[in-house]
Image (cartoon, rainbow, N blue to C red):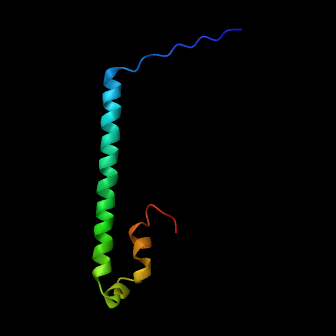
Amino acid sequence: MAYISQTQPIALFERISDFFASLLSAVDVAASANTRIREMEHLNARSDAQLEKMGLRREDIARHVFRDIYDF
C-alpha cells in the first residue's frame, strides 16, 4: 500500500504575513511587560501607608500587577 502526500508550497504573501504577525506579537509582549514594570516601580515607590490605603501590601505588588495573567 502506498501513500501519496502532496503539500502545497506556502505562498510568499502568507510567509510575509506570518513574519509581520510574529513581529507584531513580539512588540506587543514587550510593550505589555514594559508597562507592568513601570507600574511595579510606581507602586514600590509608595510608602507602606499609601499602599495600605489602596488595600495592598508590599509583598502583594507583583501579584496585583500580574493578576490578569497569573492565577496566584
Residue 14, picture quadrant = top left
Position in image of residue 13 (x %, y %): 31, 24
- Residue at 32 percent across and 57 percent down: it is 32
Q: Residue at x 52, y 13 (%)?
A: 6
x and y, in percent, of residue 37 in the image: 32, 67
Return the residue found at the far top.
1
Can residue 51 be seen here? The reply is yes
| Marker count (numbered) | 0
Q: Between 2 and 70, which is closer to the camera in this rendering? A: 2
Q: Quadrant of residue 35?
A: bottom left
**Left or right of 38 in this view: 4:** right
Give the residue at the far right of this rendering: 1
Residue shown at the point (29%, 74%) measured from the top left: 41
- Residue 44: quadrant of the picture: bottom left
Up-down relation of residue 47 to residue 27 (above or below): below
- Which residue is painted at 30% across and 36% down in the image? 20
Direction bottom: furthest residue: 49
Above or below: residue 47 compared with residue 67: below
Q: Position of residue 12 (x, y in %)?
A: 32, 21
Q: Nearer the viewer, residue 27 or 65?
A: 27
Question: Where does the image place residue 69, in percent across and percent down from the top left?
Answer: 45, 60
Residue 56 appears in the picture as rendered = no
